[in-house]
Amino acid sequence: MLTLACMIIRPFRSEDAEGIVDVHRSSVRSLEGIVDVHRSSVRSLEGIYTAGEIAAWTSGNIEGFRTSLTHSICFVAEVNEKIIGFSDVTREGKLRRLYVDPAYSGRGVGSALLRNLEDEALKQGIYQITLSSSIPAVPFYVKRGYIQRENTFETINGVRIRAVGMSKNLIH
Ligand SMILES: CC(C)(COP(=O)(O)OP(=O)(O)OC[C@H]1O[C@@H](n2cnc3c(N)ncnc32)[C@H](O)[C@@H]1OP(=O)(O)O)[C@@H](O)C(=O)NCCC(=O)NCCS
């Protein structure tokens, strides 16, 4: 895997919100039309998420992100002062978001963000992480020690978006 030597991971700052919204939007839009390779051949021809679901998912605004991320444990990944990924977990251990700019995917950014978040969670006395994963991201989390739980939905702007409940114990 080609890793990014010039990437830094650092805690979220209030002024990051704008860059974060851009990353979130492009990352979620990259999921439109992705097919579910784990399903039967007929179903696999269908996209996992519809355009309407993607629109609801990307409807968040800069102020909303800023407020929400200020109240959680959040890290950003940066290259040459440009935000290319971010992730946050609540103080109750719910990983709410992990998004990487598609231009930088597959280069270890998501893994590095997740590692930082888990380390910081442990330091703050959080021993279990739970999350609702997007369907395409499930193998990514499984490979990093997360257990697949129930099929679920995230409701955003009244739109139900399919997801998979997952969890990981940070201490054994
Ligand atoms: C899931 C996600 C955060 C992973 O981030 P990433 O920076 O691509 O992750 P990494 O590079 O650390 O690892 C990705 C894995 O996919 C592989 N990969 C290779 N090319 C890839 C590509 N073009 N895109 C994605 N993954 C790729 C990597 O080799 C790696 O494999 P591994 O799991 O066997 O180690 C990112 O794909 C993303 O933002 N997805 C869209 C939003 C989403 O679904 N987020 C999760 C919401 S809960």
Image (spheres, grey):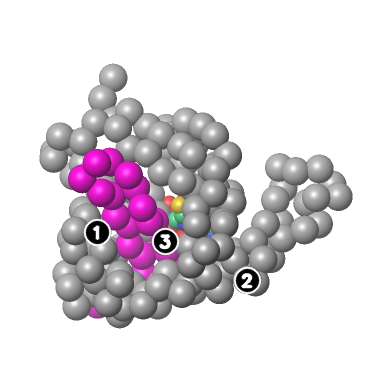
On the image, numbered disc 3 is attached to which residue? 99
The residue furthest right is 42
Mark 1 or 2, nearer chain start: 2
Q: Is residue 10 above or below residue 165?
A: below
Instruction: Return the mark for residue 75.
Output: 1
Please tell me which residue is depicted at 21% across the width and 45% down the height of the picture: 91
Q: Which residues are magenta?
A: 79-101
Q: CA distance from mark 1 to mark 2?
A: 29 Å
The residue furthest front is 158
Mark 3 or 1, nearer chain start: 1
Secondary structure found at label 1: strand
Give the percent coordinates (x, y) of residue 29.
55, 71
- The quarter holding residue 77 reads bottom left
10 Å crowding of disc 3: few (<14), some (14-19), many (20+):
many
Secondary structure found at label 2: helix
Nearer the observer: mark 2 or 3; the answer is 2
Give the percent coordinates (x, y) of residue 114.
33, 48
The amino acid marked with disc number 1 is: Phe
On the image, numbered disc 2 is attached to which residue? 52
Please tell me which residue is depicted at 30% across the width and 72% down the height of the picture: 64
Front in this rendered view, residue 148 or 59 = 59
